[in-house]
Image (cartoon, rainbow, N blue to C red):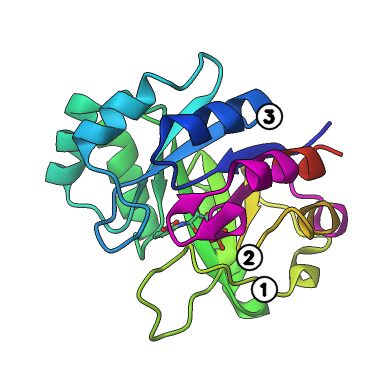
């Protein structure tokens, strides 16, 4: 079975259409003000209408307060909540209960010692996202185009389905899937021409390579 693809940080209808037509299974909207890919709830509500049935609308949040989740969900029909901050397993369970939606929890990996928490999060999250751990002084906790040593994941299994992220591009995604056995992949900066500017050709090439 080919890997499920998530294209994250979409802010234009054209890039949503290109991703969906190419075969992406998840479309990500970023609700984190510091990101160059951030969208307002109003804009996300417009964009959500462009997403075809069968493609999941994922809302990306970083350590969100309940009020932000409630505000966004009052306007945007999301299917999945992505938590990309330092949310604890208990907070993941709270967000699930508050929103009534499946939660995908991102975990940053730099070394073997980071992998154990994926077991803990697998007990409470619906999906896991294995991303590169950002540098301590990074402005963003993800979306940095930073990869990690994929060999760390060889032979690893967790309790929930998982996606691989971090520095993936049309050129390296097939090898990343082959090496890790990832069930899905998530990309943001690897399909851009500049931070926050999606490149339709790169989106199509990424999905094709991931599914090859
Ligand atoms: O994309 C962002 O701007 C972003 C901001 C804050 C947290 C996560 C973010 N993106 C996620 O980061 C990973 C990897 O991105 P990249 O392909 O290395 O650029 C991916 O899961 C995005 O969903």
Which stretch is magenta?
A: 178-206
The numbered disc on residue 116 is: none
Q: For marks 3 and 2, give the CA distance.
A: 20 Å
Identify the residue under disc 3. 22
For discs 3 and 2, the disc positioned in front in the rendered view: 3
Coordinates of residue 164 in the picture (x, y in percent): 65, 54
Residue designated by label 2: 167
Q: CB of residue at label 1: within 8 Å of ligand 1?
A: no
Q: Residues within 10 Å of mark 2 (few under 14, many from 20)?
A: many
Look at the numbered disc 1 and give the secondary structure of its residue: loop
Does 65 appear above or below 16? below
> Residue drawn 67% across and 59% down?
168
Q: Position of residue 44 (x, y in %)?
A: 30, 33
Cα distance between the residues tagged 1 and 2: 8 Å
Asked whether the viewer can see residue 14, the reply is: yes
* Mark 3 within 8 Å of ligand 1, using the beta carbon: no
Taking 86 as reference, is 200 left or right?
Answer: right
* Element type where label 3 sits in the image: helix
- Placement of the C terminus among the 4 image quadrants: top right
Please report whichever mark, 3 or 2, sits nearer to the chain's N-terminal start. 3
- Does ligand 1 reach within 8 Å of label 2's beta carbon? yes
Relative to 55, residue 211 above or below? below
Residue visible at 55% across and 58% down in the picture: 193
Q: Is residue 195 found inside the magenta-colored segment of the image?
A: yes
Residue 183 in percent (x, y) is at: 73, 42
User: SS at mark 2?
Assistant: loop
- Mark 1 sits on what residue? 148
């Amino acid at each position: 079975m080919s890997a499920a693809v998530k294209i994250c940080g979409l802010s234009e209808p054209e890039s949503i259409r290109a991703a969906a037509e190419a075969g992406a299974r998840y479309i990500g909207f970023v609700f984190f003000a510091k990101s160059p890919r951030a969208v307002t709830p109003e804009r996300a509500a417009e964009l959500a209408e462009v997403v075809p049935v069968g493609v999941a609308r994922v809302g990306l949040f970083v350590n969100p307060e309940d009020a932000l989740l409630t505000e966004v969900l009052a306007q945007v029909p999301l299917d999945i909540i992505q938590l990309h901050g330092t949310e604890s397993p208990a907070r993941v369970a709270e967000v699930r209960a508050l929103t009534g939606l499946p939660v995908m929890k991102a975990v940053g990996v730099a070394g073997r010692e980071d992998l154990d928490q994926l077991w803990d999060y697998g007990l409470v999250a619906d999906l896991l996202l294995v991303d590169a751990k950002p540098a301590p002084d990074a402005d963003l906790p993800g979306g940095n185009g930073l990869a990690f040593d994929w060999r760390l994941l060889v032979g690893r299994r967790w309790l929930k389905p998982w996606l691989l992220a971090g520095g993936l591009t049309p050129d390296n995604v097939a090898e990343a899937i082959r090496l890790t056995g990832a069930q899905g992949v998530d990309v943001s900066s690897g399909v851009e021409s500049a931070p926050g500017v999606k490149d339709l050709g790169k989106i199509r090439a990424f999905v094709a390579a991931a599914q090859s």
